[in-house]
Image (cartoon, helix red, strand yellow):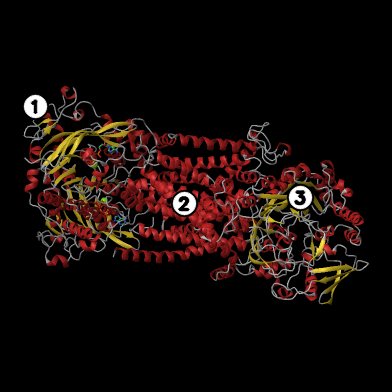
Amino acid sequence: MSVLPTTRTVVESPRRRFVRRFTGPWANRFALLVLLVWLVAAVAAPWLAPYDPLVQDIDARRLAPLSDGHLLGTDALGRDTLSRLLYGARVAGLAAITSVGVGLLGGLVPALLAGLLRGWWDAVFSRIADALLSFPPLLLALAIVGVMGPNLTNAMLAIGVVFVPRFYRVVRAATLAVREETFIEASRSIGTPTAWILRRHVLPNVLSPLAVQISLAFGFAILAESSLSFLGLGVQPPDPSWGSMLSEGRAAWFYTPWPVIVPTVTVVLTVLACNVVGDGLSDSVGREKGRA
Amino acid sequence: GGSGSGDPDPNAVLRYTTSAGATSFDPHKTVAASDFIVLNLVYDRLVHQDAQGQPVPGLAESWEFSDDFKTLTFHLREGLSFEDGTPFDAEAAKANLDRAREPDSISASLLSAVDSVDVVDPATVKLNLNSPGVHLVLTLSDLAGMMVSPKAFATPDAAKALATDSDGIGRFTLAEADPGSHYVFEAVKDYWDKDALKLGGLEFSVATDPQTNLNAVSSDQADCALVSPAMIAPAEQIPGATTRARTVLTQTVLYFNQTKSEFDDPLVRRAINLAIDRDAILEGAQEGKGEASQGLFPSDYFVSNDPVADLVTYNQDEARDLLKQAGLEKGFSFTAVTLTIPQFVTTAEIIKAQLAEIGIDMEIKALPPADMGVNFLKGTGDAVITAWTGRPDPSMLFSAYFDEAAPQNVSHVEPEGFDEALAAANAIEETAARGDALAAVQKVVLEAGAVVPVTFNQVGTVCNDRVTGYEPTVVGISEFRGVGMTD
Amino acid sequence: MSGPLLQVRDLHVSHRIGRRSLPAVRGMDLDVAPGEVVALVGESGSGKSSAVRGITQLIRPERGSVLLDGTDLVGLRGKALRRARRDIQMVFQDPYSSLDPSMSVAELIGEPLIVHTAQGRAERRRTAVEMLEMVGLRAEHADRYPHEFSGGQRQRIAIARALVLRPKLVVADEAVSALDVSSQNQVLALLQELIAELGVACLFITHDLAVVRQIADRVAVMYLGTLVEQGPADVLFDAPQHPYTRALLSAAPVADPVVQRSRQRVRLTGELPDPMNPPTGCVFSSRCPDAIARCHEEAPADRRPRPDSSVACHLVEADPALQPSLP
Amino acid sequence: MTTPLLSVRDLTVEFAVRGSWQPVVTDVSFDVMPGQVVALVGESGSGKSVSCFALLRLHGDSGRTSRGEVLFDGRDLLSLSEREMADVRGNEISMIFQEPMTSLNPAFTVGSQIAEVVRRHRGASRAEARKRAIEVLDLVGIPRAASRIGDYPHQFSGGMRQRVMIAMALATDPRMLIADEPTTALDVTIQAQILDLVKDLARDFGMGVLLVTHDLGVVADACDEVVVMYAGQVVERAECFDIFARPRHPYTAGLMRSLPRVDGMGEIEIIPGTPPMPDQFPEHCRFAARCPHAVAACEAGPVALEPRVNGGAVRCVRTLELDLRRTPEGSLA
Amino acid sequence: MSAGVVGRRTLSMLGRRLVALVPLLGIVTLATFSLIFLIPGDPAHRIAGEGATAEQVAAVRSDLGLDQPLHQQFLTFLGNLLQGDLGTSYTFRTPVWDMISARMPITISLTVVAMVFALLIGIPAGVLAARRAGKWQDRVVTVGSTLGLATPNFVLGLLLTLVIGIKFQWLPATGYVEMAEGFWPWLSHLLLPGFALGVIAAAEIARQLRASLADVLRQDYVRTAVAKGMLPGTVVWKHGLKNALMPVITVVGIQTGYLLGGTAVVETIFGIQGLGDFAVRAVLAGDLPAIQGMVVFAVIITVTASLVVDLTYGYLNPRGESQ
Ligand SMILES: Nc1ncnc2c1ncn2[C@@H]1O[C@H](COP(=O)(O)OP(=O)(O)OP(=O)(O)O)[C@@H](O)[C@H]1O
Ligand SMILES: Nc1ncnc2c1ncn2[C@@H]1O[C@H](COP(=O)(O)OP(=O)(O)OP(=O)(O)O)[C@@H](O)[C@H]1O
Ligand SMILES: [Mg+2]
Ligand SMILES: [Mg+2]
């Protein structure tokens, strides 16, 4: 008897299907490219930057882009904007990675436990997460920075704390959902040990919503870092951060808008890219819509 | 003079926006000299100043020194009373002068020449001095001479109550205060000096961002705004408004907590004085508006900077040399607090870069204006980059910051020979000679490296054209005396 | 006939709903002999799935015993339970959700082997391919993923996975209900064929009587958490004893207008009562067209009209000779 | 013979798939007489639902009716404006769906959902509409209707929800009811009740019913006419008793023989393979690939729907040569 | 009668929610109290100032009760809190509660205006995008909202002051005026900052609504409504929106917190002396009681918002499950 598949004949693993779907829309590809560029910039800033980002040249202040060997011009102190932007990418990247790391550290494991074990664990962790959630995010970060002292590490720690309940919720919900999936029951009915089920069935299925959250969190972290730096609560001068560049440039807005425009475009573009990637991820993971 | 036309409206409320408010309304117990800017509105002093910084009658209608300058007698204006109804008389003046001399008073060191205060009659007080006190007249035009209702400070939590609400005698009363950000003043009816008060009220808003301050005038949310040097050019572009700016006595300085970091060594402090390229800062942080400090006073001032010129002239090699002598050729690091105001952050950034060249690593910590001074005096930071508001008399500056007992002298270390030099200066009334004596004090101070003068500021104010009678002063502080508004 | 392979006695299964407990199965006795196909039928919500999950220990039964080859599964934990599961494998209703979408077909079929055998990767794959061919798919399908298959094909994969360990009992919970007519037939035929070939016993859960008729040796009818009637398929279909069985049979339309429109129909009114508060007396009394006063007061005991069947109904005449031999 | 209430002619529906229009339903034609229950049967994916949606123009933007007409009482529904069509829907033609659990809006009470149609099409007042809602709920056998109209759908069981759906469909006294697999999600005992209700309505109110199902048992029980669909086409159309007794299309015959029957009658046979997807529809007979009787002629070209012996129509080139009455397939070769 | 049912259910849900708030507020209070332990080094020392003498430090310690056992300290903190005593600001030497209550109306006004903006922009945009899913309108909304989400509110704020406030002078670029001075003066001062603050929330609402409404519009019951002959407007705005609003309401609740946080930036730019400005200053000065007070206040606002959200759920979702 012949029961050939009537659907697509290309062999496609979930990963390949994900890649196909993710790289489909040009916006996703573009966003990915932007993030890649920044990643490279952040890692290789010392080699890529044409100038020392801290070196001032009072005689070459507020140059417009493309003048005098300064691709993106200089700021009010004659520091090279491009170099500061590149080093700022390090700050942004570091900020995002630290805070997301803290968020994951605090959110992932309790969430898996709560989702799987339910009961008491779930009740306690969820109460704590609820409580954390009732702190307005930026204000919580402000408070932590205020108490621990304004600097980048503290700021990022603070933003990481903001992520904890959010990651917790997403992972817990995904765990609970996966838990209810028949394929988990099916695997249990075979006699698969719990640890294996966790690793093979739960984790991969929890990762996709988490990945979406993480990329959105990256965007938020960059936004929050620039907001804090703008307020003077993040990176301390003269170290470059996109937010502080913006805030500094703003004072000289009247003389030249470039020191404001460049970091603005950068922040917007990067956060945009993070969000687009997040959306792209959430559209691309999971099963095919409708039945094959 | 003002450019407004027509007669001022006696009920008009002038909205002023600036970058710093008051840390306290207690003129004696505050820790920030800059509080004078706000406090002068609600507290009259025994002596007032004119736009050139010369003393004019205030609550005292006149005064005279004894021949040896060791007795100073004030004849008080009669028939006045404090906000709370307490009459203003010699007793009240004495109580205030005594309070201003208590050890925890910001003016204690400025008044150290005063031995005692006598009430001669209800309208006359006599200050008995232990040394010649030529400087005292102008000193009493500052915080030191502000008169608070004795009833207000007789209560046990006077300090606390006065911190947030004034109780004085002046052109205005404080109607509403949101500490550090917003103040509403109401004009006092029947104020004794009709020429000085032409407004119905004054609203003071604080925005640390200079752009925001300008925006407020541009969009008619304020009538006047303080203009920082970097904003003078944009301010001049605002239609329907006039910007008045001049170089004033207000000076950006780097000042040490000598008990901390490596700053207990005068060599280190002097090295820093030499490591700073003041022209770059003037350019970078002030758009060239103002003057690079060549000493503690502007170049056209009656105190000459010549004797100290090589102590404050940019010279990296010598700075390195001094560090080496101090055993610090490898450098060191310290924290400087500064104000969140962009001009100061930028100044700090440039200083940081310049110090880095001689191996010193300076970390910057920016705090809001209303809180910075308090925090620095509490021990935050090893040094501070701030502005010293102009003082009508140079000796005040010296006493306020270098006298051992001065509250603003955070480390309470006094340069050697300071007292003697200052006393000598205060015994001379003639200007040129006094200038020389003060220059000598300056030399003592700078040889000890007690402070790093950086730049003199141009302080500007932009006012819309409804504002009349506005005049910038040399000291750099606008008392809004005689300022009015047309409809 | 040798002793039963599966012996379920007095099985009680409950679900927690918030603080309350919902008794989904209330005292079920059921035997499955080796190689036998037993169908469990009943309306939606009657507790079929709950019973199955109680039997396979996916839910811990509240009470009762489940003897598989003499070992009581109830109370087994950890390794012992896992080992016992080797002999009792399941096929689920929804072929779309019961296969982990992130695993390839070979991995899916191989998963039980990882758990229960020491087979290496290559060997597992060989076994998986063998099984694939056995269920009518081809070796080249081994590296594909479930979403690339139609429902019927997925159910074949699920069957291959259930049979790969050669269990003694396969429990199929509505294994064909989600499929359309033609794949339903194909899958059913395959299952029947494999069961016979491998000598596996099968507990087949369904609500479709036509399917039962085709596949089952014996039928157990469930209503509101209890078995109301069980017996050999032919007997039960030809001479249903319990009023509910009769209603059920007559409600299922026959695909022949001539027959269908001339049939005597037992009409039921109302729907399955709330299992939280079942009717007093006989569970079926609230809908039973023949109910008498006694039915509302007293729950009927099982009666045995024949040696190989039992009925829980006051109105059924039991064969007195068989009565004492009740389990 | 009376005129048909609904007359579908050459209905062709296409869906936009990856940028091009792909026919999913081709040349479907059938009639529904007043009081008649017409069954639309076929395997999953054969286009039953799509045809129904097309009648009421309910397919979304991704679908279009590229050809054919839908004459309701002589009016072509396909040429009405959107607004006119909205006046037909739920008023003259009502539709009920397969999924009773999801077809009612969970956010509104059952009463308000029924009252809403009455108010929309009858311009009734709130009170009148409410009265009507109670009336129809009573009609479909919801006990204590008056006290239940304030309940939300989740407070009803599946069978009751399907009855609520029917009540909603009947609230405006429509002349035609389209029921897309109304009982598939229900238990047989409940299915029997719902089918009885539908039959009664057709008989008592002269309502035309188009009943979509894949269950031949349901067809045998309730229908007057049968339309069999395969791969988007009507392959056979006939009177109910006749089509069961003498199917004229191999697919119809296969379908009937592949059914297990509760009465245990007949051998079960399996139609091998699966039906083609719309993108694989061949030009020629669409069943040929699975047909045990296929010959070269079957693959020669498109097959037309021809009149059938004993009335109706059939789409098979060999229909006259084959005797498809419950004979094992091999015996004909 | 159905209103009665909803009312009763809502009341009982409110009761349950209030009970559930007790542990939540407990944890929040504990966390706020614990902020003091984040202070690096000895809190008393830090508060007294680094230059303080041993006696001064000791005085601060006993003044703040830091020498008491932890649980005692917490109970004192809690007791004071319950009496509305948030302590006295170190730097402003004013009771924190006085400062907060003076600034509260300002920030609440700003937040409300921002939220109104968010809803006025977000809901129509979301509905439009969902109705025209896949069409250019959808794309415009999607691009717009993605951009909105990525634009820091300080950037937007700067732009608005510069263009609308300064260049065109259409609206005041800075400051705040009490409502007592007239509705329009009050509102006009809040329009620009409110917009700058509300855009992110608007974008979030639009996205969420688009997603949930597009999903709802695919639901069987929407098809039922169309099949009933309901007009497109009724289908979308009645049948669709009520069901699609749940996740949107959640977003509104969450965004309340983000808006509060955003005031820190927006108030700074627009020279508004509200709580955000207060927060920034308290933070820069490391003023613990002020920080704690601000946190407690912010939590009260967000918790109230989430209560309102929950009550709305009760209305939107008769099944009464909280999502
Ligand atoms: N996980 C669960 N939690 C709570 N109640 C449940 C759960 N699973 C089933 N039930 C309830 O238990 C009863 C029996 O359900 P069960 O699924 O066993 O019936 P079933 O006969 O398998 O029905 P179906 O034919 O619909 O699959 C029902 O009332 C159902 O609502
Ligand atoms: N929106 C759509 N876009 C593209 N193809 C569609 C769409 N809707 C349906 N189809 C296709 O149309 C064909 C017929 O679908 P339809 O739903 O009418 O089948 P059916 O006979 O009702 O099946 P079932 O018994 O499963 O309900 C299927 O192949 C399906 O894939
Ligand atoms: Mg089940
Ligand atoms: Mg269908």
Badge 3 density bin: few <14, some 14–19, many ≥20, Cα 10 Å: some
Viewer-side residue, B147 vs A130: B147
Secondary structure beneath dot 3 equals strand
The quarter holding residue C99 reads top left
Mark 2 vs ligand 2: CB below 8 Å: no
Residue extending farthest to the front is B6
Q: Residue at x 51, y 44 (%)?
A: E150
Where does the image place residue B283, in percent across and percent down from the top left?
74, 42
Mark 3 vs ligand 2: CB below 8 Å: no
According to the picture, the residue beneath numbered tag 3 turns out to be B246
**Does residue C149 sit above or below C223 in this rendering?**
above
According to the picture, the residue beneath numbered tag 1 turns out to be D321
Residue C31 located left or right of residue C265: right
Q: Which mark is residue E118?
A: 2
Give the alpha-carbon distance from disc 2 to disc 3, as whole Å: 46 Å
Amino acid type of disc 1?
Answer: Glu
**Does residue E320 sit above or below B267 in this rendering?**
below
Viewer-side residue, C230 vs C23: C23
Residues beneath discs 2 and 3 located on the same chain: no
Amino acid type of disc 3?
Answer: Arg
Where does the image place residue C292, in percent across and percent down from the top left?
11, 65
Which subunit holds the residue at mark 2?
E
Tell me if residue C257 can be seen: yes
The quarter holding residue E71 reads bottom right
Q: Quadrant of the N terminus of chain B?
A: bottom right
Residue D204 located left or right of residue C92: left
**Does residue D69 sit above or below B338 in this rendering?**
above
Which subunit holds the residue at mark 3?
B
**Does residue B336 sit above or below B154 in this rendering?**
above
